[in-house]
């Protein structure tokens, strides 16, 4: 690169030396390829600007010392590159340190040209300031008193010097902001994920500052003051404020001021750290002003305000980089350096959470390797970083504290989520069952799903709704078999930590994670404490022998048993016999294969038991004992084996065993060939849902005896070829679903006798070729959800069915839950 391109001997010489060193190092070594290449591109891009800076300094007669910092950065950079050329390929930590130093050098150069250069250029506006003074412009002319200076600046402070994982989010936000269609964007993520850092980096980005004439940055926080924000914006824009008569007047004056300002160029308003309780204040900034855009950062989503950008957790590579920056001294001064495997394992435990990586890294900074190993051992045994790191816990707690007092039920639901294992998807139906009894929410799950959506919008969990739940939504039967909840481990740990702050005897939630057969000390005492928990969760691993000790749980209303066993027996604990208040039982095997569930006799004494959910278990002995579940209202069997055998070998008639059963859900039970005939005698049954049972060929003809049946779903049962003729007797049936029954060729003519039918779901039924003429008497039928081909079959009868609407939903498949 020619010397004269740089402009100036001193500046040009050091720049040329650095550039030559970078090119030389790139040719001689491959271990810093990506970092050196990025630095080389940066040097090329800033080269023309250096000449402009030099010219500006000379023209305005500014002191040459202004460029000394840049010259020093270039000199230090040259020395760094020479050192990098000597680093051995086998020295992992030196490679890591020097790679980060190259990145830091690149960042320093960019920061100088994006931030400090602007200060130099602003000196060129001195003449403008003199002109303003000559016109006697002063603070008093703004119409605000001097104490408004206490409102603070609307300039974003500098972001941290070291940042990772923000390049892609920054690029995406700039794309959206530079697009005419979007005027309001909400950057949403849990606390400690880097939202504020991203916003500050955005404000200092050169392209953003060139695109927007003015950037106003305001931190809102929990105690949101609308008047304070507006006054600060007037102060920032040197506008006269006569005094606001009301909130409406303040907003109107702000809108008028912004309309005047956008005549000179685009304006970006950044509202940082907006809490959920500030939604009404946020709505005041929904001005329809071209060239005015608003960026909000929040733990919450505000879909009614603007589009949402969910800031993701760090990738494995970025997480490791951030952690090492916090944990490993750059000079390698630690008494002993941890191995790469140890570093990787601790990083993995932080699950990409930026604040956790920084806090845990700082706690290990410069520490002996033994302390590193001790930290990993504690976490591996179940102790969470949330327990030991106050800064991390307080940040996470602030997300929970952001819930208003009126959202007390949301807090309770959040705390309950700690009852389910980490790194597993939790079925929404399990939560519906639990909350219907614990918190008296509606039994159909509408309130529960509403709460999940609210918690999701506050980034306290992730709610994934797959294809069926989205496209088959209706107002008659809210089916959520395809809705799942995922939660970051640290948020789950927070819920558990909060639950454990009370003495064991007084806890509302008792959450126990067992490793092997090691029981907590309080559980092995000869005299067992009387526990007052209403929700009890016990998780065991594959080493657990099902050898239960006694436990006194007289007030427990929900019992969650999570285990991980394959091809073994899992015995229901004997202490369940004394759980007189138990209303909900959820048993889930997270192993690869179904484990046999035994000791069903303990259920016989549970007179208040209303809901049972079993997943991935074999239940051949379910009915071998003469148990009567007289108050059981709902039975859910998911991925269960030997259902037919269990009920066929029953020593008691199914109606006697389950006299008040109102709902049956059978999902992914692959060895179910036929539905037990005894189910047809459950005269109280309102809902029968069978899905994804691919060996089921038909429904029993006796199904017509279910006189109270209102919902019948036989979906994704690919071998079902026909519906029973007796179904014409189901006069209360309002919802019929045969979605995904590939083998069904025709409907029975008796379908016309379903005079109460209001919704008919029949998508993905490619074999269906005709409809019986009797469908013309389904005068109450309001909605048919089907494919285009099936819709054509119905169009012949729509003139006879005035209330009918044909719905052909778009197929949306969401695989994120996998």
Image (cartoon, rainbow, N blue to C red):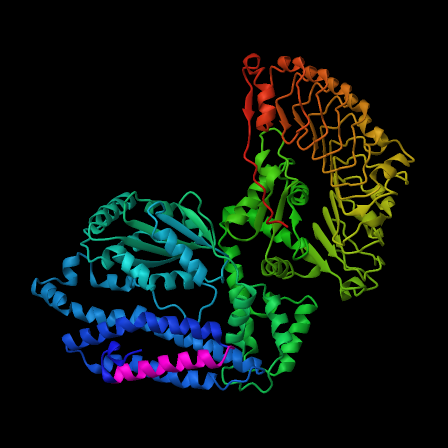
- The residue segment tinted magenta is 10-31
- The correct choice, above or below, for 289 with respect to 688 in the image is below
- The correct choice, above or below, for 512 with respect to 726 in the image is below
From the viewer's perspective, is 45 left or right of 609? left
For residue 556, say whether it is visible. no
Q: Determine the main secondary structure of the stretch shown in magenta.
A: helix
Q: Position of residue 186 (x, y in %)?
A: 42, 51
From the viewer's perspective, is 40 left or right of 525? left
> Residue sitting at 41 percent across and 70 percent down?
160
Query: 707 or 578, which is in the foreground?
Result: 707
Magenta-span inclusion, residue 17: yes
Q: Which residue lies most toward the left here?
A: 134
> Residue sitting at 45 percent across and 79 percent down?
27
Magenta-span inclusion, residue 504: no
For residue 65, say whether it is visible. yes
Q: Quadrant of the N terminus?
A: bottom left
């Amino acid at each position: 690169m020619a010397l004269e391109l740089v402009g100036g001997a001193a500046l040009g010489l050091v720049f040329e030396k650095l550039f030559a060193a970078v090119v030389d190092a790139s040719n001689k070594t491959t271990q810093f390829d990506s970092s050196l290449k990025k630095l080389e591109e940066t040097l090329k891009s800033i080269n023309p600007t250096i000449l402009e800076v030099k010219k500006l300094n000379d023209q305005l007669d500014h002191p040459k010392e202004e460029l000394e910092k840049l010259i020093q950065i270039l000199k230090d950079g040259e020395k760094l590159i020479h050192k990098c050329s000597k680093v051995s390929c086998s020295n992992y930590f030196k490679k890591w340190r020097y790679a980060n130093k190259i990145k830091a050098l690149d960042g320093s150069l960019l920061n100088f040209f994006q931030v400090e250069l602007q200060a130099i250029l602003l000196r060129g506006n001195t003449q403008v300031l003199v002109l303003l003074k000559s016109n006697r412009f002063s603070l008093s002319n703004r119409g605000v008193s001097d104490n408004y200076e206490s409102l603070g600046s609307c300039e974003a402070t500098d972001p941290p010097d070291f940042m990772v994982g923000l390049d892609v989010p920054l690029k995406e936000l700039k794309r959206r902001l530079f697009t005419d269609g979007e005027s309001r964007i909400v950057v949403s993520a849990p606390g400690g994920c880097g939202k504020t850092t991203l916003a500050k980096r955005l404000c200092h980005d050169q392209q953003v500052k060139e695109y927007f004439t003015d950037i106003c940055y305001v931190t809102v926080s929990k105690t949101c003051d609308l008047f304070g924000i507006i006054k600060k914006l007037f102060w920032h824009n040197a506008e006269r404020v006569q005094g606001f008569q009301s909130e409406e007047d303040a907003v109107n004056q702000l809108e008028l001021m912004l309309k005047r300002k956008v005549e000179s160029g685009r304006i970006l308003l950044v509202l940082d750290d907006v809490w959920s309780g500030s939604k009404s204040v946020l709505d005041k900034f929904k001005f329809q002003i071209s060239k005015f855009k608003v960026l909000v950062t929040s733990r919450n989503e505000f879909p009614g305000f603007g589009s949402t950008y969910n800031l993701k957790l760090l990738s494995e590579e970025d997480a490791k980089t951030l952690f090492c920056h916090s944990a490993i001294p750059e000079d390698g001064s630690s008494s002993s350096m941890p191995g790469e495997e140890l570093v990787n394992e601790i990083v993995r435990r932080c699950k990409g959470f930026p604040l956790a990586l920084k806090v845990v890294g700082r706690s290990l900074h410069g520490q002996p390797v033994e302390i590193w190993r001790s930290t990993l051992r504690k976490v591996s045994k179940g102790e969470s970083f949330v327990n030991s790191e106050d800064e991390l816990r307080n940040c996470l707690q602030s997300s929970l504290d952001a819930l208003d007092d009126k959202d007390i039920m949301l807090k309770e639901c959040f705390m309950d989520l700690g009852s389910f294992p980490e790194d597993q998807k939790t079925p929404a139906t399990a939560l519906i069952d639990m909350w219907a009894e614990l918190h008296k929410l509606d039994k159909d799950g509408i309130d529960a799903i509403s709460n999940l959506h609210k918690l999701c919008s506050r980034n306290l969990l992730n709610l994934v709704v797959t294809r069926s739940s989205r496209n088959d939504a209706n107002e008659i039967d809210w089916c959520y078999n395809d809705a799942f909840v995922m939660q970051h481990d640290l948020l789950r740990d927070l819920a558990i930590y909060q639950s454990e702050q009370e003495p064991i005897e007084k806890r509302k939630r008792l959450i126990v994670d067992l490793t092997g057969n090691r029981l907590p000390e309080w559980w092995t005492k000869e005299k067992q404490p009387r526990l007052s928990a209403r929700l009890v969760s016990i998780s065991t691993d594959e080493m657990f022998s099902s050898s239960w000790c006694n436990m006194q749980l007289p007030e427990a209303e929900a019992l969650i048993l999570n285990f991980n066993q394959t091809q073994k027996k899992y015995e229901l604990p004997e202490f369940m016999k004394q759980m007189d208040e138990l209303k909900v039982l959820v048993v889930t095997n997270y192993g690869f294969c179904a484990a046999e569930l035994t000791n069903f006799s303990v259920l016989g004494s549970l007179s208040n038991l209303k809901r049972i959910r079993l997943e991935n278990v074999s239940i051949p002995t379910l009915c071998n004992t003469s148990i009567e579940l007289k108050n059981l209202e709902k039975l859910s069997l998911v991925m269960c084996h030997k259902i037919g055998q269990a009920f066929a070998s029953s020593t008691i008639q199914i109606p006697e065993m389950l006299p008040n059963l109102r709902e049956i859900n059978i999902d992914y039970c692959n060895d179910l060939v036929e539905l037990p005939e005894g189910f047809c005698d459950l005269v109280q049954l309102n809902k029968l849902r069978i899905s994804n049972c691919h060996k089921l060929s038909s429904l029993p003809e006796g199904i017509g005896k279910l006189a109270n049946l209102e919902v019948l779903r036989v979906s994704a049962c690919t071998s079902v070829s026909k519906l029973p003729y007796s179904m014409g007797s189901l006069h209360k049936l309002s919802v019929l679903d045969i979605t995904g029954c590939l083998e069904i060729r025709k409907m029975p003519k008796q379908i016309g006798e379903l005079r109460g039918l209001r919704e008919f779901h029949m998508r993905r039924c490619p074999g269906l070729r005709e409809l019986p003429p009797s469908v013309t008497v389904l005068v109450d039928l309001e909605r048919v959800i089907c494919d285009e081909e099936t819709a054509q079959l119905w169009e012949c009868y729509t003139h006879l069915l005035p209330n009918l609407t044909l719905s052909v939903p778009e197929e949306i498949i969401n695989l994120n839950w996998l």
